[in-house]
């Protein structure tokens, strides 16, 4: 079986290249504002169509209808249109959010080098202060006088009473 690579899809590559021009804040703002306005306008048109549809379907009277029959038929018939309206509203919100998040992302990325430099400076300051503190502590311990020798009498424990072997014996010896 011949496994030659498929030719590159030039239409996909050119469309990707067309959208890379949007990766600046002004271009992204203009594009997303345009798309948001388009979807918001669509949602408004769909809402007008929904109102007309509900009015027309709600006014249909079929002999033998119950009290809520026309309203239930209307609701069932307009349910997909309501989903379309919500989809258009969500797309408009999505483009609004995209604009905000992209601007925040660009701001964050441009601030990173400065933040990293500040963090490195703080880290160097901390290392220097810890090194100075360690040097001071070593100097103190090196120049401190030697401790006095311990006498043999001080090393042996006091033998006033019987030696206690556990905590339970302390409770048994209340008066001792």
Image (cartoon, helix red, strand yellow):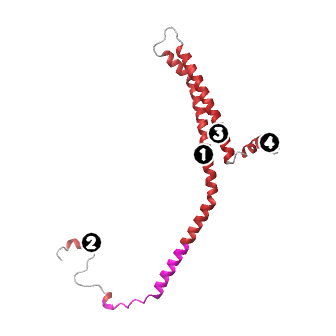
Dot 2 alpha-carbon crowd within 10 angstroms: few under 14, some 14 to 19, many 20 or more:
few
Element marked by disc 2 = helix
Q: Out of 104 and 157, give the one closest to the viewer.
A: 104
Where does residue 2 sit, x and y in percent of width and height? 83, 44
Dot 4 alpha-carbon crowd within 10 angstroms: few under 14, some 14 to 19, many 20 or more:
few
Where does residue 45 sit, x and y in percent of width and height? 61, 26
Reading the image, the residue beneath label 2 is 167
Mark number displayed over residue 33 = 3
Instruction: Look at the picture and state if 167 lies above or below 71.
Output: below
Alpha carbon of mark 4 to alpha carbon of mark 3: how far? 29 Å
Quarter of the image that includes the N terminus = top right
Element marked by disc 4 = helix
Q: Quadrant of residue 175?
A: bottom left
Quarter of the image that includes the C terminus = bottom left
Mark number displayed over residue 100 = 1
Alpha carbon of mark 4 to alpha carbon of mark 2: how far? 86 Å
Alpha carbon of mark 1 to alpha carbon of mark 3: how far? 11 Å
Q: Out of 95 and 41, give the one closest to the viewer.
A: 41
Foreground tag (3 vs 2): 3
Dot 3 alpha-carbon crowd within 10 angstroms: few under 14, some 14 to 19, many 20 or more:
some
Q: Are marks 4 and 2 in contact (CB under 8 Å)?
A: no
Where does residue 130 sit, x and y in percent of width and height? 52, 74
Element marked by disc 3 = helix
Element marked by disc 1 = helix
């Amino acid at each position: 079986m011949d496994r030659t690579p498929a030719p590159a899809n030039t239409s996909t590559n050119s469309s990707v290249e067309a959208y890379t021009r949007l990766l600046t804040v002004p271009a992204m703002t203009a594009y997303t504002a345009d798309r948001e306005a388009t979807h918001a306008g669509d949602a408004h048109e769909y809402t007008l169509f929904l109102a007309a549809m509900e009015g027309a379907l709600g006014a249909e009277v079929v002999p033998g209808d119950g009290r809520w029959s026309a309203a239930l038929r209307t609701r069932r018939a307009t349910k997909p249109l309501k989903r379309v309206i919500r989809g258009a509203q969500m797309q408009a919100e999505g483009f609004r959010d995209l604009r905000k998040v992209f601007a925040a992302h660009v701001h964050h990325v441009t601030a990173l080098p400065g933040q990293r430099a500040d963090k490195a400076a703080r880290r160097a300051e901390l290392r220097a202060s810890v090194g100075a503190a360690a040097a001071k502590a070593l100097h103190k311990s090196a120049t401190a006088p030697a401790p006095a020798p311990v006498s043999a009498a001080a090393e042996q424990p006091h033998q006033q009473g019987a030696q206690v072997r556990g905590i339970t014996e302390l409770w048994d010896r209340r008066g001792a």
